[in-house]
Amino acid sequence: MTVEQSYALAKEAYGKWDVDTDAALEILKTIPVSIHCWQGDDIGGFEVNKSELSGGIDVTGNYPGKARTPEELRADLELAMSLIPGRHRVNLHALYAETNGQVVDRDELEPVHFKNWVEWAKTQQIGLDFNPTLFSHPKAEDGLTLASPDATVREFWIEHCVKCRKIAEYFGKALGTPSLMNIWIPDGYKDIPADRLTPRKRLKDSLDAIYAEEISGKYLIDAVESKVFGIGSESYVVGSHEFYMGYALTNKKTYLMDTGHYHPTETVSNKISSMLLFSDKLALHVSRPVRWDSDHVVILDDELKEIAIEIVRNDALDKVAIGLDFFDASINRVAAWTIGTRNMIKALLYALLMPHDLLKRYQDEGNYTARLALLEEFKTYPFGAVWDQYCAKMNVPVGEKWLAEVEKYEREELFKRTQEVLSVD
Ligand SMILES: C[C@H](O)[C@H](O)[C@@H](O)C(=O)CO
Ligand SMILES: [Mn+2]
């Protein structure tokens, strides 16, 4: 059976519930996912004086072929984006600046250091998001940045974030779509703190200083990301959930929830509706926590589907900025992007193919039997046929066919990088 024929049957099956598959695909086309550049090089970046990865995050694995230059990273992203249906965004970190061989410290970064990224984004017709980098740097070695007791350290990082807001504003102006600039800091303590309040007061003051200048929302969306613990900050994280939720709501900033940053039985899907009642905008880092690690490649699991369902059923597609955040160096990195991003889009499609009004009505009528029965039956509706149709229409490989393209690129490009490194050695 062809993709078209399977789709025709699926359309009929969903149609019985007044779910319009054509309309769902039209909506899906309009949803951008922000693809994080750092999966492509294990959060290495291109600084002249590179520091070891720090901040209580870790990338494990040694799969050959990681991007070593901005050109390689952009080429890898281009391949991934050619395998992912729809038009998306790319999310950069400050350590991906291009400084022409010059040492430029983080508090001296300027828009010009991201000109190549902007020119490239124009060719791809995509928007760029941004993150200041408050780790992998000598001034972050003790794990304290914006909340450091040392005023000179705080000032350095405040200046870095101020500079990064200007860079994100430049992205927004140059690309005609606001850039989400997300602040995540590693600050915390391995062991039980003697004072939890003062570091949080310092972080609050630092954020106030960073945001002192008004920048138009046409160009820049300010976001803050919380965390529950990191490696080396097991007992206390300054920028906790309550801290940033409170800060974002009282200062009209966007709260960013990373799905790997909560206690194991907490789910981000259950937080979205509450946040949306008090905030016009919300941002996500979609990831997959596995034991101590918050950053495995996103799979199409129940929580991913539930996140997408919450966004769709609450009519919040234009309120929730969906970004990804995972890093796996044990598999092909282009495949990691492709798998994770395709899964995010699949979850959104799954959510768009549900009779939400009917299900809400069953709930209000107290018909929990029908609610559960339908929710379960829809799990085996021919969603895959609609997904295949979407990929075909969007000119990207249907099903697992994309893997052959990644394998070809691996043989012809990625493995060459390894050999070149070996011959230099
Ligand atoms: C590299 C990212 O900024 C980082 O992963 C951050 O978003 C995070 O989630 C830290 O755990
Ligand atoms: Mn994150």
Image (cartoon, rainbow, N blue to C red):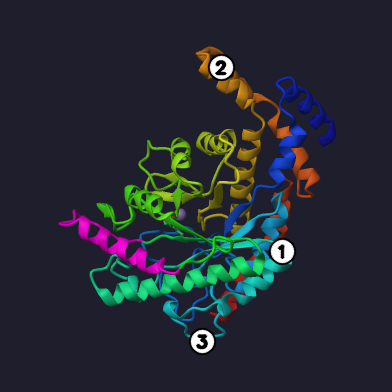
Q: Is residue 83 magenta?
A: no
358 is higher (above) or lower (below) than 304: above
Which mark, by number, is residue 102? Answer: 3
Mark 1 is surrounded, within 10 Å at the Cα level, by few (under 14), some (14 to 19) or many (20 or more) other residues, namely: some
Rendering quadrant holding ligand 1: bottom left
Q: Secondary structure at mark 3?
A: loop
Q: Residue at the location (18% across, 56% down)?
A: 193
Left or right: 198 as drawn, with respect to 140: left
User: Going from the N terminus, do you reach mark 3 or mark 1 first?
Assistant: 3
Which mark, by number, is residue 362? Answer: 2
1 vs 2, front mark = 2
Q: Can residue 387 be seen at all in this image of the molecule? A: no
The span from disc 3 to disc 2 (Cα, nearest Å) is 63 Å
The span from disc 3 to disc 1 (Cα, nearest Å) is 28 Å
Q: Would you say the residues marked 3 and 1 are in contact, meaning their CB atoms lie under 8 Å apart? A: no
Which mark, by number, is residue 56? Answer: none
Residue 275: x and y in percent read 44, 42
Q: Residue at the location (67% across, 57% down)?
A: 80
Q: Is residue 204 magenta?
A: yes
Left or right: 13 as drawn, with respect to 101: right
3 vs 1, front mark = 1
Mark 3 is surrounded, within 10 Å at the Cα level, by few (under 14), some (14 to 19) or many (20 or more) other residues, namely: few
Q: Would you say the residues marked 1 and 2 are in contact, meaning their CB atoms lie under 8 Å apart? A: no
Q: Quadrant of the N terminus?
A: top right
User: Going from the N terminus, do you reach mark 3 or mark 2 first?
Assistant: 3
Residue 180: x and y in percent read 53, 59
State the extent of the magenta-drawn residues as a range: 186-213
Which mark, by number, is residue 124? Answer: 1
Q: Secondary structure at mark 2?
A: helix
